[in-house]
Image: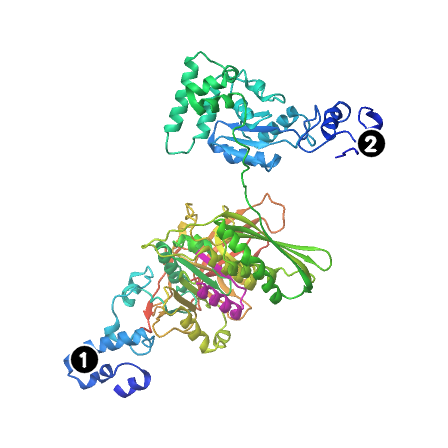
């Protein structure tokens, strides 16, 4: 922004001489130069003018989408009712261009999110809301005077604004009274907002009081109140620069506690919990060691969060000393739990998160959790999932109902064995390892042939085997299988 | 007896300790009062829980096997360390899975510390175990590390059953655990609603209120129940499990 000095102006403005009164200078100056001052844009420049956009949807479920779209364009937004959002796009002219371009960009963002919205842009947020509320209106971008922009809209458009104004209020008397005033205007023969705006204010006030004047101001597209921005979601961030680098986890725990305590208090005041915790450690080698903890439930106990962070850092330690510690928390609505008097309480998510972190640090993250069977016939096919006992039981039909009374103690990987075969049946089993079953086969049932993944070229993916259940002379009952691809025998497990 | 109790318990009112001087008809009531005091002071486990009159209805954890539940008087004792022992293919894991299934049926979370990674989820689910309620900790044969995991799970609390599978751990490694280890575990779960279970090849440890479910080999032959006489028609139908309650004190 360039504000010309008096010396810059004087050569081209002969009417002004030193010592002129300020009022005269202000009177002459606009004819020659127009200094760019914040709040008073130059003619034709829409960059810093008052400009508002309104996003309106017919579906109240899309309100969150509307807010998300609006936040992508402006931090100053206000919700009206359950279906419309007004945002201040006054400064977007420099970035995007004229109001038509802004409206097109908004429309593109809405289409990208799959939202069906009506978008209007106008000088006042009331005019923008009126334009967006009228489904018949084709042109909804008006960069000029607000009253002219809405003058041709039908009178019923005001009803939408009034319903938004009183939405959610238990007392419907105000809404009913205002609706009756609109009916009165219609009985007077008025059909458009321009006709209402043209009424004499004094006469209207005599007949309808201040409520009538309020309706007239709305019909003229005048804002009754300034835009009150939605506070939005606060950020929960704490950061600390250390005087000396930290190398060990123990001193870091004190730093984490100092950062997490105020964060926990802030979360409690906002009635929020941490859904995820992001820890950024800037190291002395100028790299950033970043860890993100996805928590199973919203929690805000600083001791639990600190323990989880420390356990995670035990498993994934930074490569150098720590210079700066920053913690950011993704907030989520706090958890409300109603315990039952009859059902036995399960471990809380905080307890489970801490336990999973401790067990993960002890035995490995992939070696603790709940097993989930995979939808395949491959033997011993399962995956480990996060332990969440409150989740409903998987309603799947078991494929192993044929041998439902037998529990297998499985060897991972299967143990190679030497088997003596007589007429196609195993008669003796030898295992070279101490403490393993072996001996003469007293009973044998089989074979059960399974095969699969023959189409997969990856090594180890195809399987083709004959399974046997055998009772050995040492008293054990085992499951053997003959790998037909490698022509060798394995001990799959012991039935126990 | 009075002298012995006096040595063991300090601070118990004298009128209770002198119950033996009273008439024999007053004995049961006074004894019950004394035991309630012992329980309050957490001194009861070594003195009273094994007494026949102490076998009152309690909040046990049924195993889901009627024969064992009848012998246990309702189920495994909560807050105590019990064990399931037996040789290979004696049905230890089957009984353990039945205990898990019964606990899951009651809506409890269960945990298995699998020292040698032997658990088979597919056969467990077919036996009725709700895998979503099962916390499975898979170790690679390190019994010390598995014991630490067991301790962590017990200290976290909230589990109905916590089982420690030591069945395939070498007996020497099991015996290397100091006996105070099991006392400490018993102390951790004392008074809680958790049943701690050890599955092993031989008797390892149990708390004074816990039980040992010994699964012995049938005297009349092999454990498997087979059907069919022809080789091709033979099927393994199941295992004959013979439980014996050893340590109900």
On the image, the x and y values in percent for residue A208 come to 42, 21
- Taking A372 as reference, is B75 above or below it? below
- Taking A463 as reference, is A207 above or below it? above
State which region is magenta.
Answer: B134-156
**Residue A8, label in figure:** 2
Q: Kindly identify which residue carries mark 1.
A: B27
Left or right, B226 with respect to A145, comes to left
Q: Quadrant of the C terminus of chain B?
A: bottom left
Q: Main secondary structure of the magenta part?
A: helix
Residue nearer the viewer, A177 or B1: A177
Label 1 SS: helix
**Residue A227, label in figure:** none
Does the stretch in magenta take in A380?
A: no
Q: Quadrant of the N terminus of chain B?
A: bottom left
On the image, the x and y values in percent for residue A412 come to 54, 60
User: What subunit carries mark 1?
Assistant: B
- Taking A181 as reference, is A89 above or below it? below
Specify whether residue A229 is in view.
Answer: yes
Q: Which residue is outermost to the right?
A: A11
On the image, the x and y values in percent for residue B239 come to 37, 61
Label 2 SS: helix
How crowded pointer 1 is (Cα within 10 Å; few <14, some 14-19, many 20+) is rated as: some
How crowded pointer 2 is (Cα within 10 Å; few <14, some 14-19, many 20+) is rated as: few
Left or right, A401 with respect to B171, comes to left
Residue nearer the viewer, B210 or A402: B210
The residue drawn where x is 44% and y is 27% is A163
Residue nearer the viewer, A242 or A64: A242
């Amino acid at each position: 922004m360039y504000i010309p000095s008096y010396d810059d102006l004087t050569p081209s403005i002969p009417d002004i001489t030193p010592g002129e009164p300020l009022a005269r200078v202000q009177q002459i100056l606009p004819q020659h130069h127009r200094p760019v001052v914040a709040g008073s844009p130059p003619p034709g420049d829409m960059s810093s003018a008052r400009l508002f956009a309104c996003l309106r949807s017919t579906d109240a479920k899309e309100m969150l989408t509307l807010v998300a779209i609006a936040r992508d364009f402006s931090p100053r937004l206000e919700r009206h009712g359950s279906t419309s959002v007004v945002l201040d796009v006054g400064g977007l002219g420099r970035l995007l261009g004229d109001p038509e371009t802004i409206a097109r960009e908004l429309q593109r963002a809405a289409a990208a999110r799959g939202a069906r919205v009506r978008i209007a842009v106008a000088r006042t947020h009331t005019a923008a809301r009126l334009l967006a509320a009228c489904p018949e209106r084709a042109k909804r971008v008006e960069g000029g005077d607000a009253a002219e922009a809405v003058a041709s809209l039908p009178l019923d458009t005001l009803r939408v604004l009034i319903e938004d104004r009183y939405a959610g209020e238990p007392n419907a008397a105000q809404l009913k009274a205002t609706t009756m005033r609109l009916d009165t205007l219609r009985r007077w023969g008025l059909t458009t907002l321009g006709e209402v705006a043209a009424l004499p204010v004094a006469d209207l006030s005599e007949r309808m009081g201040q409520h009538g004047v309020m309706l007239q101001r709305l019909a003229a597209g005048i804002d009754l109140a300034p835009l009150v921005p939605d506070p939005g979601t606060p950020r929960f961030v704490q950061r600390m620069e250390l005087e000396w680098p930290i190398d060990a986890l123990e001193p870091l725990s004190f730093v984490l506690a100092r950062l997490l305590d105020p964060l926990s208090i802030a979360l409690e005041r906002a009635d929020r919990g941490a859904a995820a915790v992001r820890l950024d450690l800037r190291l002395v080698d100028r790299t950033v060691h970043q860890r993100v903890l996805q928590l199973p439930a919203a929690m805000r106990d600083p001791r639990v969060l600190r323990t989880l962070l420390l356990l995670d850092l035990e498993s994934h330690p930074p490569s150098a000393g720590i210079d700066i510690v920053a913690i950011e928390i993704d907030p989520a609505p706090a958890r409300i739990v109603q315990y039952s008097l009859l059902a036995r309480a399960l471990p809380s998510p905080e307890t489970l998160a801490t336990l999973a972190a401790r067990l993960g640090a002890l035995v490995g993250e992939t070696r603790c959790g709940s097993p989930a069977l995979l939808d395949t016939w491959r033997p011993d096919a399962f995956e480990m999932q996060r332990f969440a006992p409150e989740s409903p039981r998987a309603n799947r039909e078991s494929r192993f109902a044929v041998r439902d009374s037998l529990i297998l103690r499985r060897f991972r990987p299967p143990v190679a064995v030497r088997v003596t075969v007589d007429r196609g049946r195993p008669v003796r089993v030898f295992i070279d390892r101490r403490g393993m079953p072996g001996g003469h086969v007293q009973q044998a049932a089989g074979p059960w042939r399974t095969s699969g993944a023959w189409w997969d070229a990856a090594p180890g993916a195809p399987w083709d085997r004959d399974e046997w259940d055998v009772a050995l002379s040492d008293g054990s009952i085992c499951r053997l299988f003959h790998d037909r691809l490698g022509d060798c025998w394995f001990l799959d497990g012991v039935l126990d | 007896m009075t002298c012995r109790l006096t040595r063991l318990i300090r601070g118990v009112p004298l009128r209770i300790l002198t119950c033996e001087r009273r008439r024999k008809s007053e004995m049961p009531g006074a004894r019950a009062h004394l035991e309630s005091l012992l329980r309050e002071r957490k001194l009861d486990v070594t003195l009273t829980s094994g007494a026949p009159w102490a076998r009152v209805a309690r909040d046990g954890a049924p195993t889901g096997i009627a024969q064992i539940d009848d012998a246990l008087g309702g189920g495994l004792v909560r807050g105590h360390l019990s064990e399931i022992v037996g040789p290979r293919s004696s049905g230890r894991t089957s009984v353990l899975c039945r205990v898990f299934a019964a606990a899951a049926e009651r809506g409890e979370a269960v945990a298995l510390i699998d020292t040698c990674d032997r658990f088979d989820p597919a056969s467990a689910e077919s036996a009725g175990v709700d895998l979503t309620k099962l916390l499975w900790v898979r170790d690679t044969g390190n019994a010390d590390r598995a014991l630490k995991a067991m301790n962590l799970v017990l200290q976290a609390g909230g589990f109905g059953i916590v089982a420690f599978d030591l069945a395939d751990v070498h007996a020497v490694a099991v015996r290397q655990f100091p006996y105070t280890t099991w006392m400490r575990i018993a102390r951790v779960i004392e008074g809680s609603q958790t049943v701690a279970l050890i599955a092993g090849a031989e008797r390892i440890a149990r708390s004074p209120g816990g039980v040992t479910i010994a699964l012995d080999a049938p005297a009349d032959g092999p454990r498997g129940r087979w059907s069919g006489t022809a080789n091709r028609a033979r099927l393994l139908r199941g295992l004959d499990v013979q439980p014996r309650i050893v340590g109900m004190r």
